Amino acid sequence: MAIYINQDTRVLVQGITGRQGSFHTGQMLAYGTKVIGGVSPGKGGQVVEGIPVFDTAFEAMEKEPADASILFIPAPYAKDAALEALDAGIRILVLITEHIPLHDAVEIMACAESRGATVVGPNTFGLVSSGLCKIGIMPNRYFIPGPVGVVSRSGTLCYEIVGHLTENRIGTTTVVGLGGDRVVGLHFIDVLKQFAKDDDTKAVMLVGEIGGSAEEEAAAFVSSSMRKPVVAYLAGRSAPPGKRMGHAGAIIERGRGTFDSKVKALQKAGVAVAEMPAEIPEMIGDLLSESS
Amino acid sequence: MKLYEHIGKKLFFRYDIPIPYGKLAENAAEAAEAAADLGEVVIKAQVLSGKRGKAGAIAFAADPGEARREADRILQMNLGDAGVSKLLVEEKLNIEQEFYLAITVDGTTRRPIVLVSLDGGMDVEEVPEERMIRWTVDPYIGFQDYMVREICRRLGVGGELRKEFASLIPKLYRLFREVDAELIEINPLAVTQKGFIAADAKVTIDDDALYRHPQLPVIREKTVLELKAEELDLAYVELDGDIAIMANGAGITMATLDMVQHYGGAPANFLDFGGGADIEKTAQALELLLGTNPRVLLINIFGGITRCDVVAEAFARVKETRGIDLPVSFRLVGTNEAEGRAILQKVGIKSFTTMDEAVRHAVEMDRPS
């Protein structure tokens, strides 16, 4: 089992004819993802990586119904494409796009909520249920099946940590990238709730960073309702307040979202907080053998 | 992008939100002239830093002579990194009470949120939580009149004050949406004989939406290097140390900084050159860093979309053209790792495979024993 997506998930690629869209369609197919169609206005009838291209998401859904859609659409046009996908009935929307205007993200989330759809991102690497289905841009080789659920706010740092796990032969159930923006569709708590219910997930790795309050909310959930072991790593210990560290969401504002408050909340909830990425495999390994 | 107070107030004026009478002055003579027109005035430095009051960059003046002296003094101040080049000279308000009003986007609910408190004038973090009303707005419903009634019920106010809120908040919400604001804050919101007046204006526009607001002035609060980095589309923040750091991805760049600090070093900067940069852009990022004259250069690459050979090629090119004679610690793994390693070897750089080794090496080289 896995969360959100599995071997049966049918995936649409919006912006499939672009450089990124076509490249990652190939990568997703190579991973085993069921990519069933693409959308590119004005390019209907073309074929990319063997996948049919449609003019609109509605046409795609009519001819090749999909469960999920991944967007490779430039920021100024991303809202329109996201709303189109949601309106056409997509249940899981993965927004890779960076720099989507804040108010556009707000509208996308409100629409998704009204439709009961799940949005991953924006500014995310996507998500992958290891060995089953990848909807995202992460390098294929690090994501091997295993017992650890991973949820992260950042991309490369997540690869770094999953890379450490893979080297130590610890695989993953599902790896979810929440995205680095201030407004994102999934928070830690949403993903933790899914991992809590997933029988195959035996332990959870949480990769957070400074800014916002998602880690504190996660800590509250862990302390009240999570029975599986959780390990966390947080980036931004050395970050000065008031400076945006690359991600729109990674900023300490008005004394909120500090590294210390997050670590304190997580530790109080019984989460093991790693100081260095390299320590993580051993910490998780120990917790896994304790719990089995 | 933060707006100066006087520009925020211009936006308020356009949306029929009451502001004090005022004039912009660039020197003491203009400030005195404004005071001659306005009578008793308040003189406010137009800078982006928040604590103007505490820093003495806001002053009252009873007459043009005092206005001239105070203006002179404030114009010579240095606040943070910035000097003061403009002053806002406004009529002194007869304030009966000071309230707080703000609209921002709440990441937790993913929605706009209106914050109202009857305790204004002080730092917002000093307002007790139970004295702050937080009203979350569904963007598809927008801000409606009934919300004012409920907010006022919770505040325990009615009559004239409720009428004033009913007139003000919808206009502010419309402004918030139409200019793509991240934050609009009025603190204090002055209660006067003439009704509500926005005594201050703090407006931050979403950088990612600036392209659809060409009418807004461009305001920079960044250092020269940060501006150059912005032109190159690099996420760059200057710090105080002397180990220059470059990595691909915001999270891993932060983690690299943290690890440098953990091993006793001091990062000179945060530089995330993003995913999938080409040779040219990577070389420009490198040159920018070298221009800061760091003692040690630390490069941490975990290649995904970013290709190791591209980063190595960029490094080799910069080394050949401009020379890199400071100690370098290079970590290189991921996509096209072997090719990248070979390129580095040719220019005499041995690379590490783990972040830990590379960071420790960088810190050691920064402190020759």
Image (cartoon, rainbow, N blue to C red):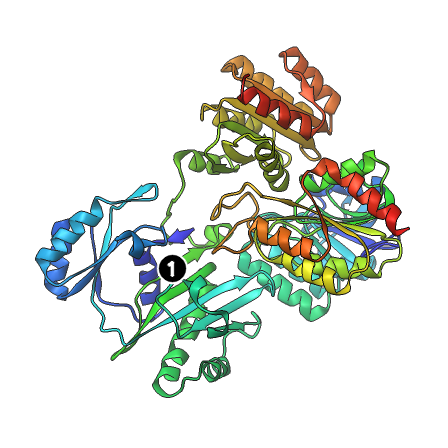
Locate residue A58 relative to residue B82 in the image: left or right: right
Reading the image, the residue beneath label 1 is B202
Outermost residue on the right side: it is A292
Dividing the picture into quadrants, the one containing residue A120 is bottom right
Position of residue B309 relative to residue B92, above or below, is above
In front: B318, or A13? B318
Percent of width and height locating residue B135: 52, 73
Which residue sits at x=87%, y=51%? A291
Amino acid carrying label 1: it is: Lys
Locate residue A267 relative to residue B246 in the image: left or right: right
Which residue sits at x=14%, y=59%? B34
Local crowd size for mark 1, using a 10 Å CA cut-off: few (<14), some (14–19), many (≥20)? many
Dividing the picture into quadrants, the one containing residue B251 is top right
Percent of width and height locating residue A224: 74, 65
Position of residue B145 relative to residue A168, above or below, is below
Percent of width and height locating residue A53: 76, 49
Whether residue A119 is visible: no
In front: A185, or A146? A146
Whether residue A145 is visible: yes
Which residue sits at x=14%, y=50%? B28
Percent of width and height locating residue A191: 74, 57
Q: Label 1 marks which chain's residue? A: B
Position of residue A189 relative to residue B140, above or below, is above
Image quadrant for the C terminus of chain B? top right
Which residue sits at x=63%, y=58%? A216
